[in-house]
Image (spheres, rainbow, N blue to C red):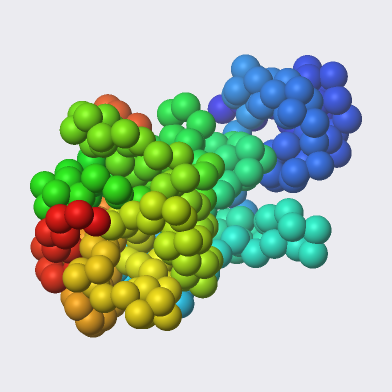
Amino acid sequence: MAAGPTLAVVAREAGVSVPTASKVVNGREDVAPETRRRVTEALDRLGYVRRPRFDAAKVPGLVDLVVHSLESSWSGAVLQGVEAAAHDAGLEVVVSAGLTRTRGGRPERGWLDKLIARGSSGVLFNLAELTPSQYAWLDTHRIPYVLIDPVLEPPPGVVSVGAANWQGGVTATEHLLSLGHERIAVIAGHQRKMCSSARVAGYRSALASAGVRHRPEYVRHAGFDETVAHRRMLDLLDLPEPPTAVFVCSDHMALGVYEALAVRGLRVPDDISVVGFDDLPESRWVAPALTTIRQPLAEMAATALHLLVRMMEGDRPEGTRTELSTRLVERRSAGRAKMGR
């Protein structure tokens, strides 16, 4: 059997040095995009075999889960879903909290090196912001991966699982409209994040369908931060015509909204109605219990694991984006609008 081309042959074909070709193979970030493209095309054209530095047969049932944080109940629900699905599939899971960053703010490759060293068969990324070079590294090393609720729009062909965020925004706003509210504000997350922009788009669509005027001053962004949501709610209350209801795009931010209303001596829902998003455990603990949009976090995580297993077995999913339905969970934080307000 003839040996495959050496890295020197690949470098000559791409018109680069051997060290530069090695950087591309090993996922280094200090390579220009055009150079990376030429080397990658040469690798594929010549059939260069990227040899892993581990014996995958020793750990055939290991997958990685990279989560944004381990401190929130949001992440806890994702972990629960992955663990249950992995147990059913006979897999072991290694959990990493976030993508480590250098002092300059650039993601390190440490977790990528560890991924290779321990011989993981695939990776799930939850709320991760991967760089182009990290995507390229994963593709170069033929490591299957699935994104759970990606922060930004993934590159073409990348498999992801999320919730029906737009429909959730529609449902939350329609519920408040059905209670007679027209002055409905929204406190969203980050403007550039997929889930946040989709929920705000759903909110605006529901208002338009009901013939209710959209007020730009009623749209505030708080970056999914409870403290910032507190300030945004106070800003809304200071408007000449404050809202009578607010759709808060996460249950965590809704806690800050509750605190802001308490500071002003306002009662939920007597003075202002509140609807959240996620259906985290804390939505049941606050008083009054929070009406919210249930996001099926555990089911999203389990679905992602099932897709990853298929990819590990060589079966490519037909579609790249899977969306699970959201639904309204009615509790006691949303009431009918008061006449004359």
Residue at 50% in and 52% down: 221
Q: Quadrant of the N terminus?
A: top right
Q: State the count of labels.
A: 0
In the image, 169: left or right of 264?
A: left
Q: Is residue 177 visible from the viewing direction of this image?
A: yes
Residue closer to the observer: 260 or 134: 260
Q: Is residue 308 visible from the viewing direction of this image?
A: no
Residue at 20% in and 54% down: 340
Give x and y (percent) for residue 171. Answer: 18, 45
Quadrant of residue 44 within the rendered picture: top right
Vertically, is 54 above or below 12?
below
Residue closer to the observer: 319 or 76: 76
Residue at 69% in and 44% down: 27
Give x and y (percent) for residue 103. Answer: 79, 64
Q: Quadrant of the C terminus?
A: bottom left
Residue closer to the observer: 160 or 260: 260
In the image, 6: left or right of 319?
A: right
In the image, 294: left or right of 196?
A: left
Give x and y (percent) for residue 198. Answer: 37, 39
Spot the residue most to the front. 340
Give x and y (percent) for residue 256. Answer: 42, 72
Residue at 74% in and 57% down: 105
Vertically, is 86 above or below 311?
below
Vertically, is 170 above or below 14?
below
Residue closer to the observer: 163 or 203: 203
Spot the residue most to the right. 17
